[in-house]
Amino acid sequence: MANVLKKFTYQTKIYYEDTDAGGIVYYANYLKYFERARTELIYSFGYNHKELNDKFDIKIVVHKFSITYKKPIFFEDKIIVESFVRDVSNLRIEMAQNVLRDKEVLAEAMVELVTIDNMGKPKIIPEDLKVKLSSCIQLKT
């Protein structure tokens, strides 16, 4: 049996406000698509960021982010953002993310998230959330 990463997908379309005068998505807007996909992943586990903050005094914040742009995205394109959990520890979540149009990879990203409390100090991920994130790492096929 091989190990493969499970993926979470988020779909959206490109609006005029996302683009520059040439109808191409402005490079910084990719960050929004990646963030929305990660937020939807958290929602899929039955959590939201407000609840994590209010109930557990925890924020999930970006520590490192790198992106490789491969091809442009255009006005009214429909895209899918794939998110893969690669590693989870008590304080860190590592993910890979891709933006696709019709199965073609347009951008690839690596993100390292850390968890902090409201004072900005490291805070351990709630066990239930850690288990749910960890369950996404590998799927036996």
Image: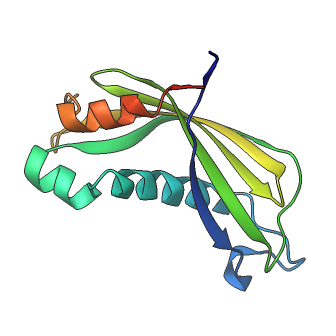
The relative height of residue 11 versus residue 49 in the rendered view (above or below) is below
The residue sitting at 66% across, 39% down in the picture is: 109
Task: Give the residue drawn at x 73%, y 84%.
Answer: 16
Is residue 126 among what the camera can see?
no
Residue in front for this viewpoint, 21 or 76: 76
Q: Can you give x and y, in whole percent of width and height, for residue 91 in the image?
A: 30, 25
Write the residue at 79% across / 80% down. Answer: 76
- Residue furthest out toward the bottom: 16
Q: Quadrant location of the N terminus?
A: top right
Q: Position of residue 69 (x, y in %)?
A: 81, 46
Quarter occupied by residue 140: top right
Most extreme residue toward the left is 55
Q: Look at the image and tell me whether residue 1 can be seen.
A: yes
**Colour scheme used in the picture?**
rainbow
Residue 36 pos. (x, y %): 50, 60
Q: Name which residue lies at 38% across and 55% down.
A: 44
